[in-house]
């Protein structure tokens, strides 16, 4: 018997049916996102549920997201925050802002979300300059894949000790282990995977889940 279960579509459906609590506004937003040509950018429900769970586990009040798209992962996270919690959600595009905000509003969490349009690395640097270093409880990273090593160093400064970073797409749909594939995104993610393994400032857990998710705990 293999020591790992091979995931099938049926099993993933089972996980979604039994392991997620997707609210009506989340479901509606997922369905509307599904109709867009870029729909594959959205995180799956079980990943949203994990982000929600982590925020509750940490009693997080201050969270950041890099890469908002239609705001589906944003909504999962904002719903886990207390009323006075704050989620700084950054995207360089505002094409999907109205769609996102309609559903954030419907779910009653619009006030908790501080949506910023801009390049994530610039917004993060500005926040560090403004003295917000060491104040975030959780940072979810799902923006420009070729900037992940840059995001890591900035996020490490923004997180408090004991805070968690979550990196999405760390397996690049299998490309990380395909020697024939080399592009700026895959190469940067390979570099980050090696660095994270060896970096004594953090503890890690790399999950073969969704498209590869790495949890990074800031220990110092
Ligand atoms: C994979 S999607 C995010 C999906 C979203 N987390 C969800 O689950 O629905 C990536 C997003 O990152 C944004 N993005 C790409 N490069 C960026 C950058 N340098 N700064 C900020 N946002 C960026 C894109 O516009 C896109 O909306």
Image (tube, rainbow, N blue to C red):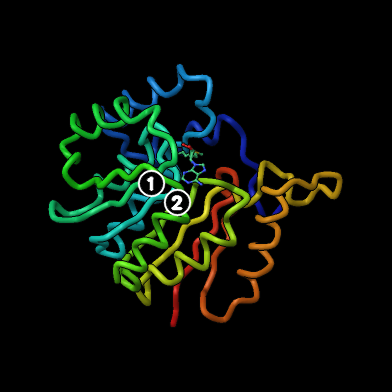
Q: Residues within 10 Å of mark 1 (few under 14, many from 20)?
A: many
- In terms of secondary structure, where does tag 2 sit? helix
Secondary structure of the residue carrying tag 1 is: strand
Q: Position of residue 119 (x, y in %)?
A: 46, 48
Q: Is mark 2 within 8 Å of ligand 1?
A: yes
The circle drawn on residue 33 is none
Quarter containing the C terminus? bottom left
Does the residue at mark 1 contact the one at mark 2 (Cβ under 8 Å)? yes
Pick the front one: 60 or 149: 149
141, 214: nearer the viewer: 141
Q: Earlier in the sequence, mark 1 or mark 2?
A: 1
Q: Residue furthest right?
A: 180
> At 13% across and 51% down in the image, what residue appears?
83
Residue to which mark 1 is pinned = 90
Distance from Cα at disc 1 to Cα at disc 2: 6 Å
* Residue that protrudes farthest toward the top in the picture: 35
In the rendered image, residue 26, in percent from the top left (x then y), is placed at 31, 31
Q: Quadrant of residue 190?
A: bottom right
In this orientation, does residue 94 appear?
yes
Which residue bears the numbered disc 2?
Answer: 120
């Amino acid at each position: 018997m293999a020591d790992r279960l091979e995931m099938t579509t049926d099993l993933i459906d089972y996980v979604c049916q039994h392991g997620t609590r997707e609210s009506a506004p989340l479901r509606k937003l997922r369905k509307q996102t599904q109709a867009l040509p870029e729909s594959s950018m959205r995180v799956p429900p079980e990943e949203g549920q994990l982000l929600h769970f982590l925020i509750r586990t940490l009693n997080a009040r201050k969270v950041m997201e890099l890469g908002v798209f239609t705001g589906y992962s944003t909504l999962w996270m904002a719903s886990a925050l207390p009323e006075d919690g704050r989620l700084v959600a950054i995207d360089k595009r505002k094409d999907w802002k109205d769609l996102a905000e309609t559903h954030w509003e419907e779910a009653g969490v619009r006030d908790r979300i501080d949506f910023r349009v801009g390049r994530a690395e610039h917004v993060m640097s500005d926040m560090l300059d403004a003295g917000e270093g060491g104040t975030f409880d959780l940072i979810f990273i799902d923006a420009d894949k070729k900037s992940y090593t840059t995001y890591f160093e900035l996020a490490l400064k923004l997180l408090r000790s004991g805070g968690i970073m979550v990196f999405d797409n760390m397996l690049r749909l299998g490309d990380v282990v395909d020697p024939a594939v080399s592009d700026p995104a895959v190469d940067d993610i390979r570099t980050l995977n090696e660095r994270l393994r060896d970096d004594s400032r953090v503890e890690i857990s790399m999950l073969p889940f969704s498209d590869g998710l790495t949890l990074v705990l800031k220990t110092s």
